[in-house]
Image: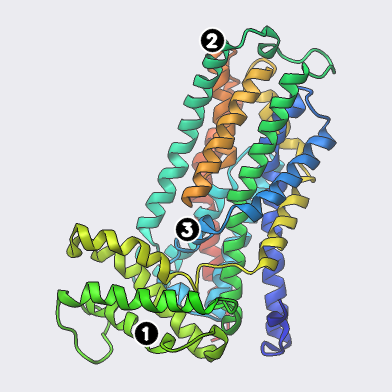
Amino acid sequence: MGALFDGSLGTVGSILLVGALAVALGFEFVNGFHDTANAVATVIYTKTLRPTWAVLLSGACNFTGVFVGGIAVAMSIIRLLPPDMLVRSGNLGLAMVGALLLAAIIWNLGTWYLGLPASSSHTLIGAILGVGIANSWAEGHFGTGVNWTKAGEVGLSLLVSPMFGFGVAALALVTMRKFIKDERIFEPPHGDSPPPPWIRAFLVLTCSGVSFAHGSNDGQKGVGLIMLILVGIVPASYALNLEATPKDLERTYQAAIAVEKLLAPHGDCPAEDPKEGADPVCAARHHLQAIEASLGGQTAVANLSGEDRWHVRQHLILVDRALPKLLGDLGPEKAAQLGPLRKDLGALTDYAPLWVIVAVALSLGIGTTVGWKRIVVTVGEKIGRTHLTYAQGASAELVAMGTIGVSSFLGLPVSTTHVLSSGIAGTMVVDRSGLQVGTVRNIALAWVLTLPASMTLSGGLFLLFRALAPG
């Protein structure tokens, strides 16, 4: 962390960096209390745990989940942005990160104030898309400012996961009714009495699992945002992993050589740097050769100059974006070889320092203990016409825990809010408890509006910040 304050930024740069990091951690703090309700609503409304203990347990599990979740989701979030924004540093990067973070925080706070369980994931992804589209419009090539392939993957996961939550939670409840003979699990709580011990233990387990899965998925989004800030403002220290081992360096170097060999038979390329619009194979080979020239014979990233680290990162990002477009020309055998090699190429760029993970985990965990009540009331009381039963709460949380956990493993950002809320709705339909149409309508409206609202907010803020930024 000492690289943040090595004096190279100056007073103004240091203030900007601290401010940007504070806003990013603020997003995670808001995310914590905005999305915590999804995990604790069932245990609170089934009288399994008192609110204080439920929230503290959820906060601890969120904190732990950030550490175990890895960084696959963080890299998916970063790769939504266009490569021309990811390979530039300075004021454009600050405008980008500031706009998307402020837009996400504004929308999250608004929906929290109204008690609507809207999705922080949906909000953040909309904000990223808004920034990318606004930048492409300002650059004169509207619509090309987004990695639409990655956006499609993320959008599909956000669309399918609530439907999956609804259907599978309903199926889980039907299965419970068939195999569990203890009728007490299908009853709502009686007064302030806690549920039977075995039911209570199961509900505590699912609450912990949802919180852990939320930390492993949503925490990574905060990690990705902070890495965008650090790479944009302090590229010499964070463009590449300064703690990479000689083995990591060799891994990336050998991957660049191997990929270039795969591309070599597909046409002759000029010796000079490819111009804009050049053959994509030649452009990719140019980037690979530049990586080989910089990393050949190196044993430590620190041995490279700050400028060289930034250039290596640029080449790695650009070649990674180019390769999927070439798969159709390589044939199935070479395309299969490319997958592991792309992972090796990212060994120096796909990382996050420990202090970043700790800071995000603390922000998410502490945020979990604040402001949870508004959305808990909506999830616990206002989706169905009857009080949540033990089995309904357990079914919805079990499905949410599994869905989010698998999505984190696959590197797909999904919405804890959407999965759990739709799961509760599914169990209410199966039990013929009825749905409160007004609440469901408002949740659906928030779900529909989140993407265009966050895109509009972030795009407008980005254009404003871009116009005000010097240079």
Mark 1 secondary-structure assignment: helix
The residue under the point 55% across, 42% down is: 405
338 vs 348: above or below:
above
Give the residue furthest to the front.
247
Mark 2 secondary-structure assignment: helix
Nearer to us of marks 3 and 2 is 2
Amino acid type, label 3: Ser
Percent x, y of residue 343? 41, 65
Q: Residues within 10 Å of mark 3 (few under 14, many from 20)?
A: many
The residue under the point 73% across, 30% down is: 204
Q: CA distance from mark 1 to mark 2?
A: 62 Å
56 vs 444: above or below:
below
Residue receiving disc 1: 292
The residue under the point 46% across, 58% down is: 129
Residue receiving disc 2: 178
In the displayed structure, does residue 29 sit left or right of residue 323? Answer: right
Q: CA distance from mark 1 to mark 3?
A: 26 Å
Residue receiving disc 3: 76
Amino acid type, label 2: Lys
Amino acid type, label 1: Glu
Percent x, y of residue 190? 80, 12
Percent x, y of residue 18? 72, 74
Mark 3 secondary-structure assignment: helix
Q: CA distance from mark 3 to mark 2?
A: 40 Å
